[in-house]
Amino acid sequence: MNKTDKIISQARKEDRKALLEAEAKTICSEYGITTTKFSLAKSEKEAAKIADQTGYPVVLKIVSPDIIHKSDAGGVMVNLKNKEEVTAAFNKILENAKTYKADAKIVGVLVQEMAKPATEIIIGAIKDPQFGQTLMFGLGGIFVEILKDVTFRVAPITEQEAAEMVVSVKAFPLLNGYRNTPPADVKAIVDLLMSVSKLVMDHPEIKELDLNPVLAYEKGTKTVDARIILE
Ligand code: ADP
Ligand code: MG
């Protein structure tokens, strides 16, 4: 069995519908999607050791099956520059999680490389009762949240359709570069959409997928957060 099947059947066994970020990212990797490197820490000592190996700055994130939106729970701390900051963040995140949901099951804290800033995009998939697996694309931040500048296609999509999705959002010119921001690697975004299409077509048991945000670099993309919800 491949990693994706193993992760999904393990979640089923535990009666969990929401996969953990590390699980979702492992599945993404199996489909050729580049994500931020991560490692699970169970103690502040372990967190500091992983951070040293990863190289600073790092990001720490809560890992709990009971916390889906990590920042809402004070569960994400970015730009940690040394061991002391990592140790403090580790304890603060656990404390915040407890305040947010006293009985939340805590698996640990994920220590990640801090991705360099770039134009943010969002890729989603939702299983529509009528059309089946449907893909969504938009640019991050206000474009999706406030302006609802998104586009949808029913999966599976061809390379041509993936390319159409990218150019069809109003914010597309931002991906061509502006001021100090270099143009994004549109081909890599197209490849990413194709990979997500394959992933959700291979796994009809995926009800929702959310890569938010993905950083669109001059060369390649990097998925910073991944969420997968099973049926
Ligand atoms: P959630 O969506 O569950 O609240 P995220 O993992 O998306 O949590 O983290 C919240 C925000 O923190 C992201 O939108 C991003 O701006 C920033 N962030 C998270 N992880 C990283 C990372 N590894 N590198 C850089 N920024 C990050
Ligand atoms: Mg997110």
Image (cartoon, rainbow, N blue to C red):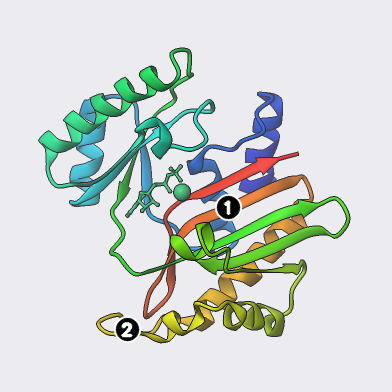
Marks 1 and 2 sit apart, C-alpha to C-alpha, by: 25 Å
Instruction: Name the mark on residue 33.
Output: none
> Based on the displayed image, in which of its 4 quarters is residue 8 positioned?
top right
Q: Residues within 10 Å of mark 1 (few under 14, many from 20)?
A: many
- The quarter of the rendered structure image containing the C terminus is top right
* Residue located beneath label 2 in the image: 182
At horizontal 67% and vertical 48% (from top left) the residue drawn is 208
Q: Residues within 10 Å of mark 2 (few under 14, many from 20)?
A: some
* Residue located beneath label 1 in the image: 210
Foreground residue, 193 or 120?
120
Can the viewer see residue 2 in this picture?
no
Report x, y in % for residue 141: 44, 60
Of all residues, the one furthest to the right in this rendering is: 130
At horizontal 44% and vertical 25% (from top left) the residue drawn is 107
Of all residues, the one furthest to the front in this rendering is: 146
- The quarter of the rendered structure image containing the N terminus is top right
Foreground residue, 177 or 24?
177
